[in-house]
């Protein structure tokens, strides 16, 4: 399928490698006409409207927000067509303060364990991919990018530090008030996809297309779409400058666009 709209892309505003200024070129290289910028727990300061055009490429202002259902596994929500509310901004500020402190602790743990200076400082928007890249690039770390996660900073790693996240109910409320459409991200990345998909009862969309790099049983997400009248979305979850690995066709994007009412 030709990808017309890649609705899941990260920039340097969170843990992506792509500058916003480089987005149009990356989109053209991939033959993509629409891109949703969905940085982790942050709004992009240079996207002042829910949707805009950047050098001929339609850019949807979105966000990816980590939330925690009561008694369940943490999941990610994708909000599209953001018009910031004071309540959302306040919560994101709280999250960024927590992320910055968490990043500082992870860096300290890695440097102490490896006996190196990574040359990276905690800041807003810092994520574990930034730290993994610093580990990979350090000549004396002895770990590449993948090993940094597998052996050091992954969820079960010796240098891992958890963080506080927004509750599912509060996250849905905040994003619903601020966005045109809210959906569940990459349902098959969770340990229990069925439980994650049950949450779509409270949402308007689900990420139907995603580059899992493995075979998945698509029937549960298709049932969720039908049962809850969800809008299918899709995107590459790009953290580099390669877009279009997954997304919507032009007719599917028209359905999305109508649902978001941008």
Image: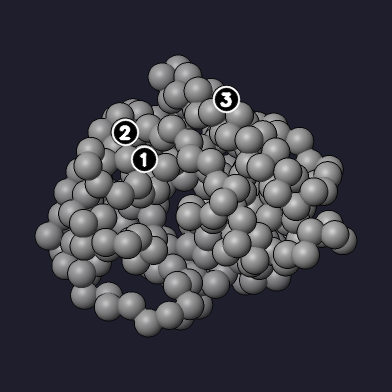
**117 or 132, which is in the foreground?**
117
Rate crowding at label 3 as few (under 14), some (14 to 19) or many (20 or more) other CA atoms within 10 Å. Answer: some
Query: Which SS class for mark 2?
Result: strand
Q: Is residue 15 above or below residue 188?
A: above
Count neighbours of disc 2 (C-alpha within 10 A) and say few if under 14, some if 14 to 19, many if 20 or more: some
- Mark 2 vs mark 1, CA separation in Å: 5 Å
Q: Are marks 2 and 1 in contact (CB under 8 Å)?
A: yes
Q: Is residue 238 visible?
A: no
Q: Is residue 64 left or right of residue 53?
A: left
Residue 167, disc = 2
- Seen from the viewer's position, the closer of residues 92 and 192 is 192
Residue located at (48% from left, 55% from top): 156
Of labels 3 and 1, earlier in sequence is: 1
- The quadrant in which the C terminus is found is top left
Q: Residue at x 22, y 49 (%)?
A: 199
Residue shown at the point (57%, 69%) measured from the top left: 244
CA gap between label 3 and label 1 equals 16 Å
* Residue 130, label in figure: none
User: Residue drawn 12% across and 60% down?
Assistant: 227
Q: Earlier in the sequence, mark 2 or mark 1?
A: 1
The mark that comes first in sequence, 2 or 3, is 3
Residue bearing mark 1: 67
Residue tagged by mark 3? 97
Q: Taking 230 as reference, is 23 left or right?
A: right
The foreground one among 139 and 194 is 139
């Amino acid at each position: 399928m030709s990808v017309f709209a890649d609705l899941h892309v990260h920039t340097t505003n969170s843990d992506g490698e792509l500058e916003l200024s480089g987005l149009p070129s990356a989109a053209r290289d991939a033959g993509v006409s629409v891109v949703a910028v969905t940085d982790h727990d942050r709004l992009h300061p240079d996207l002042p409207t829910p949707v805009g055009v950047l050098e001929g490429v339609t850019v949807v202002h979105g966000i990816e927000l980590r939330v925690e259902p009561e008694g369940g596994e943490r999941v990610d929500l994708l909000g599209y067509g953001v018009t910031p509310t004071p309540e959302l901004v306040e919560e994101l500020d709280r999250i960024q303060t927590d992320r910055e402190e968490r990043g500082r602790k992870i860096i300290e743990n890695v440097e102490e364990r490896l006996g190196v200076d990574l040359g990276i400082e905690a800041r807003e928007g810092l994520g574990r991919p930034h730290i993994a890249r610093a580990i990979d690039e350090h000549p004396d770390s002895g770990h590449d990018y993948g090993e940094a996660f597998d052996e050091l900073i992954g969820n079960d790693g010796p240098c891992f530090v958890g963080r506080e996240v927004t509750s599912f109910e509060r996250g849905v409320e905040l994003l619903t008030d601020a966005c045109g459409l809210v959906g569940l991200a990459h349902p098959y990345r969770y340990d229990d996809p069925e439980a994650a998909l049950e949450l779509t009862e409270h949402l308007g969309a689900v990420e139907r297309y995603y580059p899992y790099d493995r075979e998945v049983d698509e029937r549960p997400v298709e049932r969720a779409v039908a049962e809850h009248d969800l809008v299918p979305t899709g995107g590459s979850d790009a953290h580099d400058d390669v877009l279009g690995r997954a997304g919507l066709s032009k007719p599917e994007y028209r359905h999305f666009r109508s649902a978001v009412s941008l």
